[in-house]
Image: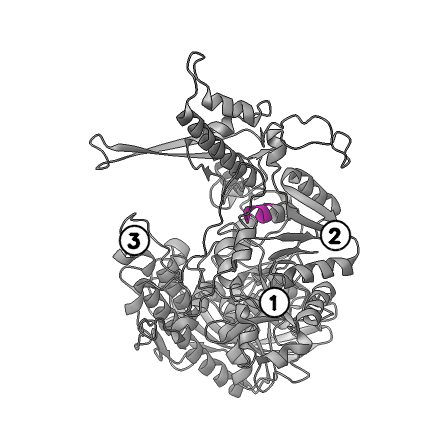
Amino acid sequence: VVVNNHHHRILSSTEANRRHMEWEAGLSINGGSEDGYDDDENLLPDTLRQEMSHHLAHAYGTATQSPFDHGMICVMDGMGETYRTMKLGQNDESYTSDFDLATDIELIPNNLQDQETLYDWREAESIYTFRKEEDGIDIVPVFKRFQKENSPPTLYNHGFENMDSVGALYSRVSSHIFGDWNACGKVMGLAPWKVHTWNEGKIAPTVYDQPICWGSLYKEYGAFNVDRTLLEGLPLISRNDAELFDPETMVRRRRYDFDDDDYQPMSETKNEENFKIDEPNIEEAPPPPRPKQLPAQVALDAIGLAARMQNDLEEIILDFVSHFKEETKESNLCLAGGVGLNSVLNGRLARDLGFSETYISPYPGDDGIAVGCCAFGLYGPKEKTKPPIWKQPLSPYLGPFPTEIEMKVALEAAKPWIEIETVWNEQLRIDLIVSELDKGSVIALYQGRSEIGPRALGHRSILADPRQKPMVSFINEKVKKRESFRPFAPSVLVEEVNEWFDLGQNGASENNKNFSPFMSMTAMVKESKQNLIPAVTHVDGSSRLQTVTPDSDPFYHELISEFFKRTNVPMVLNTSFNTIPAEPIVESPKDAIRSFLYSLRSIDLLVMGNYVIRRREPNMAALLGQAPLSNDGTDTPSLFAEPLCPKRAGPVDFEASFSLNQGKTEDGEVDTVTRVRMPDRIMHHEEKNNWFELSDELEGEILSICDGTNTVNDILAFFTMKPTEEDFDEEDVEDTNMLVQQVLSRVYRLYENTFLSW
């Protein structure tokens, strides 16, 4: 077993401290808060174990599965192993670092042992070369820049936000804009808006002339410079500018929601379909398409900051990689580390520097460390018996394979809210998907084993038509419930990619035909094609693409091929299948159905294996006893129809909070917010959406009454009951009609959110 944890050594604390780990588990502190921490299945006490340094694990995870047999590896991330750990590890046979593989590594600073620091130094950027042999691989460290720990490592995440690697600086910008050090993908998506203006140029992004970082990563210590002026003071995410608040309601708008100047709302047809209620006695109109949103000043500042950081990153890293391309004389490039997720930078490195081939795994970040440790165990210098070296990249589809039983159990649990069609014939299933995409439907695709890494590559994806520009705002707002500026990626047939995208001088070469199989590269959409695929063309004309081959995923390739035959567009819009805010990509069938239901009909179709799943329309007529029912399971109407009784999906917890608002009346006014929690409902997520806010007290009362024994008529009678001596006048009748509508609309809402069924 090979391990790495760049925060600290692992093996030294587990070898001799089993009883201490039991103590931690008993108190649920440190690693002991995780189930199985001190179990034999975790510790594997009878197994040979080896530990390796962080950047070396990145290098092994990428180079061993590259499609070429020699090249240069560039590893860049926020922070890696400490210098002290690597140096002390030279005397430990259970630990391997770069210092064990070479003695002539070029280091920055070159006199680390003489440098004074209160804390330590950590890996920032590293260069290696490699050669594959039939039974192994030879990886040679060439260069390594260490960064100083500028603040106590006992701080959150080791004071990572104060470090000076290019990855740490990019994360600092992410924290400043979004309040999340790991939202770097959002920063990358925000930066291209620098080219856009609004209202005939009257509104434009802020321009910051002073770089955040500049200079050289490979020259003497001090040649790389950092100016944190833009990254200090009040973060953009914390600003509460007056323009963010509605002057009448004082409701704050989302600070980074804005559209381009050519904003197109989703057509009224699609809008109506997602809010349509065909049942009697409910009158709800679809909300009108919202007007174009202009960016607030804080958003313009954020665009400028993101663009400044992205520009600095590209200039510094192109210089860095170009230098070592010349020094190593290598013609192929591997990229690893968290910075390897920056597809805009990756695209420039692949196109602009003249490499024959560029390889980036589906998991260049720390999720790829496990693969690096595995590769070291198979092919490392200490392994005597080695299997044949990998000739091609491993499949990105390495996650669990959902069983038929798992799918059936998940479908059965959701049966009151979904309609299920079984389509055994694969071609018929593909034809159905393509037909729906062509009509403007949004489709969730759940197929086979899940992807490893942060990109959805057709197995856990949401698909749409790339020709429809309104899909951008619709999926961002209604499906993904995220900022409106976010772009979408295409999955494109590899045989057609050069007709639609500018891949540079090597894009059309036979060696580099599969340019971006893991959605790792951004390229420019050819100008003549941009208006044909506006939903996957970002504001600057770029697109982060996935090239799909028939060998890598036959089903997905055939699906896109059929879409190409129908539309003359050889790609589909592809985004990750997750609809609950902050939820990762769905994994299990239960996750997929929960996410599908949570979309509240903004996803039209879920295709899971052989099952085609649609959202069931609530039969409000049957609930009221207004429609004939069949008693024998056929379409033959019965003579009598008993009203159905709505029933809660499980036990429910209520929680109410009160706030007293002064100034509304002389006595003040109390606002009550009631929320409920129902762990048994199919849409319940213990971490992300475990509490649901009710619209009002009436909705809470209805939920409490719906125990499966009361009809809607009973519920209406409960709320409209009057003393027998009192007669109903016209006003009472009008109030009762209004109450009927209110009760039915709340029953419908509770059904849609899987609290009720009948």
Among the 4 quarters of the image, the one containing residue 432: bottom right
Q: Residue at x 48, y 85 (%)?
A: 323
Kind of residue indicated by mark 1 = Gly
**Quadrant where the image shows the N terminus:** bottom right
Kind of residue indicated by mark 3 = Phe
To which residue does mark 2 refer? 610
> Reading the chain from its start, which is encountered first: label 1 or label 2?
1
1 or 2: mark nearer the eye: 2
Residue 598 painted magenta: yes
2 or 3: mark nearer the eye: 3
Taking depth in this image into account, of 586 and 233 the one nearest to the observer is 586
Taking depth in this image into account, of 514 and 367 the one nearest to the observer is 514
Q: Are marks 2 and 3 in contact (CB under 8 Å)?
A: no
Which mark, by number, is residue 61?
1
Name the secondary structure under disc 3: loop
Q: Residues within 10 Å of mark 3 (few under 14, many from 20)?
A: some
Among the 4 quarters of the image, the one containing residue 459: bottom right
Cα distance between the residues tagged 1 and 2: 34 Å
Q: Residues within 10 Å of mark 1 (few under 14, many from 20)?
A: many
Cα distance between the residues tagged 1 and 3: 48 Å
**Quadrant where the image shows the C terminus:** top right
How far across and how far down the image is residue 250, in percent? 29, 49
How far across and how far down the image is residue 398, in percent? 67, 59
Q: Is residue 79 visible?
A: no
Taking depth in this image into account, of 231 and 630 the one nearest to the observer is 630
Kind of residue indicated by mark 2 = Asn
Total marks drawn?
Answer: 3
Which mark, by number, is residue 245?
3
Among the 4 quarters of the image, the one containing residue 735: top left
Boundaries of the magenta span: 594-600
> Reading the chain from its start, which is encountered first: label 1 or label 3?
1
Residue 678 painted magenta: no
